[in-house]
Image: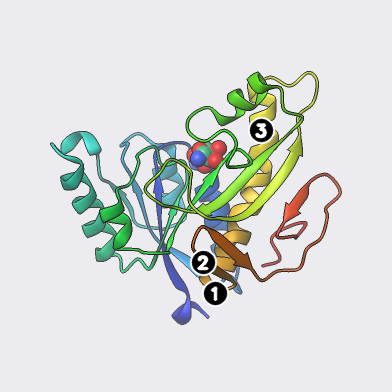
Amino acid sequence: MSGQRVRLGVLVSGSGSNLQALLDACAREDFPAEVACVVSNVSTAFALERARKAGVTAKVVDHKAHATKEGFEKALLDTLRAANVEWVCLAGFMRLLSADFLGHYAGRVLNIHPSLLPAFPGLHAQRQALERGVKVAGCTVHFVDAGTDTGPIIAQVAVPVLPDDDEKALSSRILAEEHRLYPLAVRLAVTGKVTLDAARTRVEARATVGELALRNPGATVDPA
Ligand code: GRF
């Protein structure tokens, strides 16, 4: 199926465990996408190692090497285009993208965030959740718009917040779900099972309730 696979560009800044989940999903014969290129704005990001190990093109486009945001985004766009990237996945990418940049990949940029949006956008979402005392936390995959974690929501997973949780414990419970959710959401999006209508999405998927977490759209694991 590799001939028809959608070419993903994954933008990263750090560890890249979500990138790894996407690389692992893409290694499966029947997954509808492949990672064509990984781009980091941080030259020391471990995500770059993961890409190289998977035999995927890994590039650094350092925002600090550009005097303006426009210059940075042009370099980013040139890099993605050189790899014939069709969809862009943000995976721990710590820069906000402008409406101008997003216009080049309209409706084809996804992000994963470690909260049940619209609660707790921005940095340290898990810490925000603990500080607010919520009893249910989770993660969200959404289309990216020019705001901070504000784009239309595609899929979410909820996990419990336990009484003794610290930021590390809650983050790792959420992260395990992120790794399942992102490939599932990418599959839904690139195969046209998510339609975008103003601020809302309609997702064609069966709804099920998993044992430990509520997932919507439902799937206990990525059905790929
Ligand atoms: C994840 O929690 C993701 O939701 C957030 O940044 C973190 C990135 O982790 N946007 P990793 O680099 O994928 O391990």
Is residue 146 or residue 214 the one in the foreground? 146
Residue occupying the far right of the picture: 211
Q: SS class of the residue under badge 3?
A: helix
Judge whether residue 27 can be spotted in this image.
no
Residue pictured at 17% horizontal, 36% vertical: 65
Residue pictured at 28% horizontal, 55% vertical: 101
How many labels were placed on the picture? 3
Circle on res. 205: none
Circles 2 and 3 in contact, beta carbons < 8 Å? no
Q: Which residue carries the number 3 mark?
A: 172
- The answer to whether residue 41 is above or below residue 214 is above
Residue type at the position of mark 1: Gly
- The answer to whether residue 197 is above or below residue 126 is below
- The answer to whether residue 192 is above or below residue 201 is below
Q: Which residue carries the number 2 mark?
A: 196
Colouring of the image? rainbow
Circles 3 and 1 in contact, beta carbons < 8 Å? no
Residue type at the position of mark 3: Ser
